[in-house]
Amino acid sequence: MRVVESFFLSKSRFEGFSDAVLAIAATLLVLGFHLPTSIATQSEAEQTRALIGIWPQYLVYFTSFATIGIMWLNHHAQFRYIQKITYGMAIANLFLLLLICFLPFPTEVLASFGITRPAAVYYGLTLCGIAIGYAVLHIQLLAAHPHLPQKIDPWTFLGAILYPVSTAIAYFSPIGGIIAYVLIALYYMLPQNVARSPLKP
Amino acid sequence: MRVVESFFLSKSRFEGFSDAVLAIAATLLVLGFHLPTSIATQSEAEQTRALIGIWPQYLVYFTSFATIGIMWLNHHAQFRYIQKITYGMAIANLFLLLLICFLPFPTEVLASFGITRPAAVYYGLTLCGIAIGYAVLHIQLLAAHPHLPQKIDPWTFLGAILYPVSTAIAYFSPIGGIIAYVLIALYYMLPQNVARSPLKP
Amino acid sequence: MRVVESFFLSKSRFEGFSDAVLAIAATLLVLGFHLPTSIATQSEAEQTRALIGIWPQYLVYFTSFATIGIMWLNHHAQFRYIQKITYGMAIANLFLLLLICFLPFPTEVLASFGITRPAAVYYGLTLCGIAIGYAVLHIQLLAAHPHLPQKIDPWTFLGAILYPVSTAIAYFSPIGGIIAYVLIALYYMLPQNVARSPLKP
Amino acid sequence: MRVVESFFLSKSRFEGFSDAVLAIAATLLVLGFHLPTSIATQSEAEQTRALIGIWPQYLVYFTSFATIGIMWLNHHAQFRYIQKITYGMAIANLFLLLLICFLPFPTEVLASFGITRPAAVYYGLTLCGIAIGYAVLHIQLLAAHPHLPQKIDPWTFLGAILYPVSTAIAYFSPIGGIIAYVLIALYYMLPQNVARSPLKP
């Protein structure tokens, strides 16, 4: 298409904007922490119990932060050998950022509901959305470079399988689903899985 | 004017600041999500209904996020061939950013009021303000380059017509207005409408 | 001092960090908006009145946003001809950023108290603090360049006079103080007052 | 390891992301300020007392902001002579940012609990975590440059001693602990302690 060909977005501003959005989404996660109200009037023992009692929130905070961190590392790797940003990449990237920016809400829902089935499934569906958004961006990158050698990267599309499975687990066992989300985050942080480029140099 | 001539702002810092503000405004939108209070004590079925029942908030979140995303793409296109930032551009840009940074509040008002007439019109008026701010910045850009060939860009000023019309629709039908806002956002994301430069290379 | 001489901070990372902090502080101002609670259950006429009735919040939002915008423009101008960041500049800059980052709180206090004497004076004292912080940074810049020709810039230090006077006005007339803060912001946005470098090129 | 060797993250995007996260964490601290509720209906004298009465919050705000500021200065110094980001640095850095991004929550806990033992110890434990995260990143840097001359930097590891001691003080005297945290922040801001590179140029 003629119009798409003439579309040009500088890579540095594209990456800068993406990094800023990812950094802010990661930092906003802390606003999801909730303590039982009117705790200031309680005894010191009750205050201590409250700070320990929110342990599921620590777990979810770690998972959400790790997910955004991994997304940032992979985003960086994806664009390593990209010279030109196409219209398709720009729109797919905005769609992915929209989903990542939404992550603090399900994180907060899990914090305020506790680990109930609706909260755990809702969180998992958001991760599924992010995985799909990431795969769509991946496809845009490959489509824009048809003549370059391409690594068929199984890991990218693996996310589109692992997250739905984990969400299904969360439906039957909320805490099991949360553990699955944590394990996926840890799995993606392993050196052989992180920051792989879809294009050969 | 002598003073204006001597004004100089580096383009990279100007763009970096604008991108950061746009990125943060987009990310803060998630804070507008509201669940009915004391939901933690409700049954799982009620929790599920609550998460589905806030569907208008998802629609408004999408619209606000898409509006800021489009604004970022167009902002980038506007300054593609600009070498020098003038005083007029700097002030017009701050005015535009002030309006965009305000967007999370009408987004939250729509979330907490529901789709009522005041909330839908209030949101539309904010979009009108952003469209006007964008047109003012556009005029500053053209005014600073009187000797360069200029594309008379109908799209930029179209926004100053489409948003007031949609706000008028919202006055008579709040949900109709919301749908109009969504359609404008989608329209501006079409490849032939996005990221057009007002100056020929 | 030997240690200070060996201190080196890259100008680009110094400016990038400052810009990010200023951009975030500007964007967080929107979180200060407050509507009377349980407004969702009110009639449309009451909702409309509520959105108009918070007009002092719009005024304060404008003033705070304009103050941060001016601070950004002047910060940029200050460092235009600076090549090397000294320890004194880095500490003075962090101190200034600490005060600017605090601005959303007095903005929110004015929004929740209304324009009362304590709220208006509290806001003014914060602006005084920012003006002092800016002057201290200015002195650090001049001190680090003793051999360069320096413009004695009356505007920079004028802020350290205008803000205390406005705060005093706010003590006797809260709304008078607010108007004074708005006028100072507008005054600093005039082309002959904005973005002046303390060092000659 | 083969995989780790091939890992590559551009230093500029690595630093840009870290700076953005630090800037946002610093700016979010202001959201921790809390005034007693329904203060809008109180007399002006009571409003004034409320604004003065939250003095411990000012102290904690200063300490948290200074801690993040110092972390930024030292982060900058650490990477001054680093050319290549390894997998270990990237993961250690994300872990450190996760802990720093958490700081606004203990800051808010101290603001809402007041200076009680649980709140002061909780805040101290977070600072301990940050100090450990920083030391781990430091070790990653040294490990990636085994053949370069290295300054054994006592200050970096001193934090891993000072913060646990201060947290212990907070257990016996909450206010004593807070004063210790403030003193450590001031100590690290001294010119001979700030922004030291672990690698010789």
Image (cartoon, coloured by chain):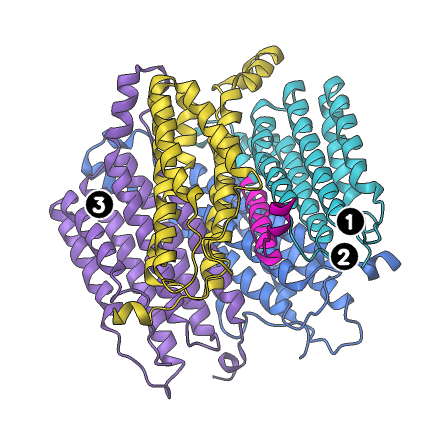
Chain colours: A cyan, B yellow, C purple, D blue
Q: Seen in the image, is D197 located left or right of residue B65?
A: right
- Image quadrant in which the C terminus of chain C is located: bottom left
Residue at position x 49%, y 58% from top? B200
Residue C35 as seen in the image, left or right of residue D14: left
- Same-subunit check for callouts 1 and 3: no
Q: Which residue is mark 2?
A: D87
Residue D4 drawn at (x, y percent): 82, 58
Q: C89 left or right of B47?
A: left
**Image position of C107 with respect to D200: above or below:** above
Q: Position of residue B148 (x, y in %)?
A: 42, 63
* Place of residue A98 in the rendered image (x, y in percent of width and height, measured from the top left): 58, 37
Chain bearing tag 2 is D
> Magenta segment range?
A1-28
Q: Which residue is mark 1?
A: A194
Q: Quadrant of residue C139?
A: bottom left
In this view of the protein, can residue C12 be seen by the observer? yes
